[in-house]
């Protein structure tokens, strides 16, 4: 029997406890290991709760218990979660988590502490919720040079973009509705400004390159400037607007970014709507493969956390092996990365714009008084210069192939 | 350095050699292991080929070589492939393969021989080509009770169905075109009659249940009866026609089947066109997740085989653990499984059909002289009885949700 200790009894902590308990016999059948939640750390009390008698208020109870095998950290953030994770790993107790903020901020350090003490720090659930993308990258696609990752990594923004497209409502209305339904946080910035997706693509980029891609290095743009008109144009182009996290290895270097893109129907990410997440991986031999599932569905994240717990219990976490050095990965200058852009300008700027951006392809206007077009492939820097040359554009969205 | 021996130097064997050679440094970086193809077994000679000097004609050269670490079997079929695989495993040499016929036929026996001799028999590439579905099921989704698998598992039939839909051509014309392009075999039966998909769903069902689901037990129907009219009806219903391999755990038992289905746009498999494969997995906690990629793209299968080789080289194949007993899984009677059907009858049978099938929903006729409808949920047995009662139907396709 393996004793599991959960830090935090909020939504996720209670779901982790539920999955471990409901699927106890399934896990035992598959791995021969018997998982039991022994203690749950929370400052609150939970009278009448099914796990009432397991709640403890002092982390030291867990740390000093000689029976502690595995710690599940569901507290979130980089404060107490960092401190407790570090203490557990220093004692040789393995930790698994879905805490992407902590993994993106302190991943290499915590993995190093784990290694020095014969423990493991696992975080399958930190990216893609129920999609086992970390194991896919590190344990399945081992024969490939992974040179591209493109993901819909944030369910909240995908829900908002899908609803704006379907219902014709504006960003603020849909955001409020998403907040009312519990799909968006009261403070939505981490999601809508792209930082959550940025942390996730930083983690995936680090695992692919083996070096540290800090989330602060990721060029990040959110969705709050996307307007109804953009969806109308997208439909003319038979494209959808999605917030993508992207990692690319190019002959000139590697880069990582988060921004809204218009993607065509031929891209498998096109059909990923609502709260679903998906990650498209390109390998030099495998070509494209895609992994699709719930980003943060009711029990999807808990299923991924429990898969880590199961791995720790049955093979010491050896079902996945990370390489993620503390050394920073040098990224190429984002302004030199190249792509095509969809652009909206005032109708009377048509001639100027055609000249400044060169090689443009007109898009049937969805708005009176506007001229819309698609540029040829150009660098971010050249785009910005052309834009400045004509005194600014009404809007622009990058194109994904 | 690990010495790899490839049995068979056809398309796949040469692609395996290519992947191992081209990605040698990538694999070394990821795992620290250096893979080298030492010998390739083939009866032919290959003058001028890059691997000319590695060709041997006698399997014993490989079997007796003390340096043989890993054998890759690409010969196909259940004859010499079976014999050589068995001999290698008996000598404690691990084998990996994409040979789904042999895995479906002799999987449990070969795995047992491997186990008794401290070797491994790995076959990630046997199902889904470049999609790492076996590792996903056995190593990633360990916390879930997997109660449903639905896959587009055969690229040839998906190519044919996609082309029939897109081009309005009939089955024979598209099949001939697929054969000319090399997407279909000269003898297309294994693909178009569903047996290839049947072997694959049998393998996945065995790995999920842990017992042996023989491919002969899988209810199998091919695509040769699908007509242009069916696609016209499907478009009216906003559905696509796909050949699905399905495994289901139900309260009444488990079953596995292969048949053409009409699937709605809300199903993520809807967008899987052409030679692509995809597998939708349902877990009791995770809900739906989907894995998408090339079924048999140029180097996709070789990438999967090389991932197995890499796993064997770096951790003795322990990156995936199978449970697949020789004991046969008892499947429920297929005739008692339940679903809805799309049905075409002669127009003058409308009243009779409405009576016999009950609870029907009319579909706008795509063909003069026909009446088309959708049944309520009913068992296969009841469907057959109703069909017989009215003297047969023009056609019927099952509906997937």
Image: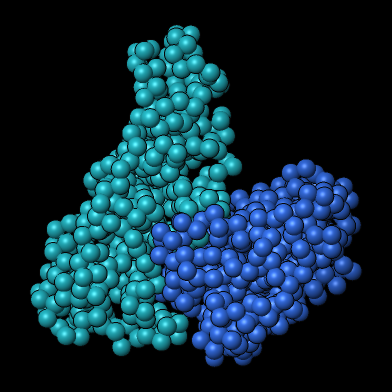
Chain colours: A cyan, B blue
User: Which residue is located at x 44 percent, y 31 percent?
Assistant: A338
Q: Is residue B209 visible?
A: no
Please state if B109 lies on the left or on the right of B220 as rendered.
Answer: left
Closer-to-camera residue (B164/B248): B164
Please state if B315 lies on the left or on the right of A176 as rendered.
Answer: right
Tell me residue B317's x, y (percent): 49, 75
Q: Height in image: B191 above or below A265?
A: below
Closer-to-camera residue (A34/A359): A359
User: Which residue is located at x 34 percent, y 74 percent?
Assistant: A317
Please state if B38 lies on the left or on the right of A341 as rendered.
Answer: right
Q: Height in image: B343 above or below A272?
A: below
Closer-to-camera residue (B26/A181): B26
Q: Quadrant of residue B294?
A: bottom right
Q: Residue furthest front?
A: B53
Tell me residue B241's x, y (percent): 71, 55
Q: Height in image: B34 above or below B143?
A: above
User: Which residue is located at x 28 percent, y 42 percent?
Assistant: A217
């Amino acid at each position: 029997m393996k004793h599991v200790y959960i830090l935090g009894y909020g939504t996720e902590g209670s779901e982790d406890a539920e999955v471990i308990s409901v699927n106890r016999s399934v896990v035992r059948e598959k791995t021969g290991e018997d998982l039991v939640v022994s203690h749950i750390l929370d400052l609150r009390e939970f009278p009448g709760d099914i796990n009432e008698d397991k709640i403890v208020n002092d982390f030291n109870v867990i740390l000093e218990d000689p029976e502690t095998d595995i710690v599940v950290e569901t507290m979130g953030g980089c404060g107490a979660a960092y401190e407790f994770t570090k203490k557990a790993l220093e004692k040789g107790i393995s930790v698994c988590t879905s805490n992407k903020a902590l993994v993106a901020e302190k991943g290499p350090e915590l993995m190093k502490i784990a290694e020095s003490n014969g423990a493991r720090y696992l975080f399958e659930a930190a990216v893609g919720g129920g999609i086992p993308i970390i194991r896919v990258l590190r344990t399945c696609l081992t024969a490939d040079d992974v040179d591209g990752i493109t993901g819909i990594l944030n369910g909240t923004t995908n829900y908002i973009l899908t609803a704006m497209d379907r219902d014709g409502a504006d960003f603020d209305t849909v955001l409020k509705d998403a907040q009312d339904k519990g799909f968006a946080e009261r403070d939505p910035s981490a999601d809508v400004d792209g930082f959550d997706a940025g942390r996730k693509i930083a983690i995936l980029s680090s695992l692919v390159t083996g070096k540290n891609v800090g989330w602060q290095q990721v060029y990040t743009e959110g969705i709050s400037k996307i307007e109804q008109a953009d969806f109308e144009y997208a439909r003319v182009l038979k494209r959808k607007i999605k917030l993508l996290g992207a990692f690319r290895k190019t002959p000139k270097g590697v880069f990582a970014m988060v921004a809204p893109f218009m993607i065509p129907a031929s891209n498998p990410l096109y059909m990923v709507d609502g709260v679903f997440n998906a990650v498209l991986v390109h390998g030099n031999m495998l070509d494209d493969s895609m992994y699709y599932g719930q980003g943060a569905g009711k029990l999807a994240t808990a299923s991924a956390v429990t898969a880590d717990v199961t791995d720790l219990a049955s093979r010491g976490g050896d079902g996945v092996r990370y390489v993620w050095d503390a050394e920073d990965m040098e990224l190429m200058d984002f302004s030199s990365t190249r792509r095509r852009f969809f652009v909206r300008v005032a109708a009377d700027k048509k001639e100027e714009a055609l000249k400044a951006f060169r090689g443009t392809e007109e898009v049937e206007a969805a708005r009176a008084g506007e001229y819309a077009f698609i540029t040829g492939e150009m660098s971010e820097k050249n785009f910005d210069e052309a834009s400045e040359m004509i005194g600014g554009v009404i809007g622009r969205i990058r194109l994904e192939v």
